[in-house]
Amino acid sequence: MLPKPCALAIAGLDPSGGAGILADMRAFAAASVWGCAAVTVVTVQSTAGLRSAHPVDQRTLIRQVREIILHENVRSIKIGSSSNARAVARLLPALARDAPVVLDPVMRPTLGAKRLLDRGGLRAILGMLESVTVVTPNVPEAEALLGVRIRSVEDAERAARALVELGARAALVKGGHLPARAARDGVVDVLALGHRVTRFRGPRVDEAPHGTGCTLSSLIAGHLARAANIDDVAVEDAVAWAKRELRRALARPLRIGDGLLVLSP
């Protein structure tokens, strides 16, 4: 029997299941691949917000990743950065030799004041870019990575190109945080891949559900896990497919308790 393709999420645990590795597993299932996970940080949070974050011991994290890579058919990797970004950065060059990597540089939760990434972690994220297949920042994350202000779709395109120049094979800058007038009352995400930039337009939702960024990056990683070759066509196809799946999920969010809605792709 041929082994089923697996996608590995290296990310945090959100006990509500709205974001983090539990959201990653649902996205991997939607892409018809098996989900594996290595936990970087354990959080105390719910859909009402993040209360505290507790990083996993670095040696334990590294052992989790190495055990999965050794024994499972890992065909892609999704990284949701956290306070353990430096440990992941040390592992990444070896991991990226064998599988495409999707990096979602999470720096702050949707609700809650707790920042998930310190300055050292930010430097680690920048160092990861040379090993990354697709990086998927939202506008505030792209601003933090590049030290620029992004107020228009054209600014987002320049930011995406700059992330590619820093080493990422492709950069998807998500436009949900842009002013509504920037996209004529919709949302535009921009993908820089090589010398090309592609715009993905979609409707603006009234209430952004919890875990949207986690879900999108994991949908991309899940689709890449099934690709025969990781060429530019496969990367753009994965992003386009993930955007369609996310749009369908955004049209039917779930309420599981207090606070934010959640997604079920």
Image (cartoon, rainbow, N blue to C red):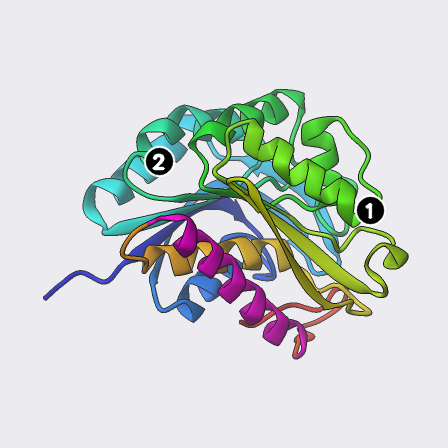
Q: Which residue is drawn at 66% across and 75% down?
A: 253
Left or right of 215, for residue 141: right
Q: Name the residue under label 2.
A: 96
Please identify, in this view, whether the residue under mark 2 or under mark 1 is nearer the observer: 1
- Name the side, left or right, on which 176 lies relative to 120: right
Residue 97 is one of the magenta-drawn residues:
no
Residue at (35, 35) in percent of width and height: 96
Lateral position of residue 194 relative to residue 43, left or right: left
User: Whole-percent x and y of residue 195?
Assistant: 54, 40
Task: Tell which of 71 and 58 is nearer to you.
Answer: 71
Dot 2, how many residues are within 10 Å of its Cα: few (below 14), some (14-19), or many (20+)? some
Residue carrying label 1: 152
The one nearer the camera, 123 or 238, is: 238
Q: Are marks 2 and 1 in contact (CB under 8 Å)?
A: no
Binning the other alpha carbons within 10 Å of mark 1 as few (below 14), some (14 to 19) or many (20 upward) gives some
**For residue 81, what is the image quadrant?**
top right
* Residue span colored magenta: 230-251
Seen at 50% across and 29% down, the residue is: 167
Estimate the x, y position of residue 26 in percent, counting from the top left.
47, 66
Disc marking residue 182: none
Residue 179 rendering spot, x and y as whole percentages: 87, 53
Q: Residue at the far front: name it.
A: 195
The amino acid pointed to by label 2 is: Ala
Asked whether residue 3 appears in the rendered view, the answer is yes
Upstream in sequence: badge 2 or badge 1: 2
* Secondary structure at numbered mark 1: loop
Q: Alpha-carbon distance for marks 2 and 1?
A: 32 Å
The amino acid type, in three-letter code, at marker 1 is Ser
Q: Is residue 248 magenta?
A: yes
